[in-house]
Amino acid sequence: MKFYEFGDKKNPEILLLPGTSCHWKINYEKHIELLKEKFYVIAVSYDGFDETEDTIFPDMITETEKIELYITENFNKKIFSAYGCSLGGSFVSLLVSRKNIHITHAIIGSSDMDQANKPVAKIETFIVSKIFSPIVIEGRIPKFFQKRLDKKTPEEKKYMENLLNGFTGNGKGLPFVKKESISNQFYSDLITPVGEGINVEGTTIHVFYATKMGEKYEKRYYKHFANPDIVRHDYQHEELFFSYPEKWYHEVLRVCNLSNENK
């Protein structure tokens, strides 16, 4: 695991956690440039997804422990904010609920919070790994998926292409990623409980809820978090993040009380 830091250390921290099978830089490159203005940025690069290391993604808890250790040793166990993109939202939830470090503003990025028992998780992982491995490692979109993409409206197609670029490395692929890392990450996320009714004094959990995902996800957020700040957007999963980075940035500033609107 690697940590990449940007900006002025005098600024409040923001920890960035990438999505499923995503490379930290591809996931957050546009956003880091914006965030550096007001934040000290700490970008997490998971085991198995960094080209400078020969590692395999182990499991959610092991990775969470490594993040906790880094924050403990370098930031005295306290950071101002964290944003979890998709899968990263599970990490944010774990970091808050375990209480080994403190996060003042914990932001969940329209994460699905899917959970499954081990037999179901193994089946789902087998299917997803078979489809996703060539997308991530080779940057190749399967023909059946491309056909579905071509039938989308221009707006939907743009959103899907932005989303897929996060997996494919903008079409170049991530040849250093191993299939085992993709499988381990997906499976571990499904079987690792993130907690229910999470409520930590001094922490506000903000959820960027993409309403087009459906009401069942909003219900999940209220199940996992005791008093979440639900921020509704009429978008698909992480569409705000991938398609409208500047708007996303201003929403982050607002919920963290750093926007001019808050003054």
Image: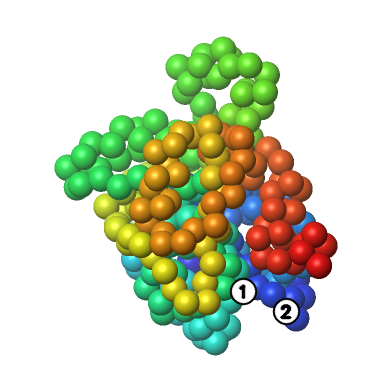
Look at label 1 and name its amino acid: Phe
Q: Quadrant of the C terminus?
A: bottom right
Please name the residue that numbered disc 2 is placed on: 9
Callout 2: 10 Å neighbours few (<14), some, many (20+)? few
Q: Position of residue 84 (x, y in %)?
A: 53, 56
Q: Position of residue 245 (x, y in %)?
A: 71, 46
Residue placed at 48% from the left, 34% from the top? 213
Label drawn at residue 262:
none
Q: Secondary structure at mark 2?
A: loop
Relative height, residue 99 to residue 38 (above, below): below
Determine whether, in the image, residue 144 is placed left or right of residue 115.
right
In 3D space, how far apart are the residues under numbered discs 1 and 2 (Cα atoms)? 12 Å
Residue placed at 68% from the left, 38% from the top? 243
Residue 125 appears in the rendering: yes
Look at label 2 and name its amino acid: Lys
Q: Position of residue 19 (x, y in %)?
A: 51, 49
Please name the residue that numbered disc 1 is placed on: 80
Q: Position of residue 35 (x, y in %)?
A: 73, 61
Residue placed at 69% from the left, 49% from the top? 248
Query: Foreground residue, 203 or 144?
Result: 203
Callout 1: 10 Å neighbours few (<14), some, many (20+)? some
Determine whether, in the image, residue 238 is placed left or right of residue 197.
right
Relative height, residue 88 to residue 94 (above, below): above
Determine whether, in the image, residue 172 is placed left or right of residue 34.
left
Relative height, residue 211 to residue 108 (above, below): above
Residue placed at 31% from the left, 32% from the top? 127
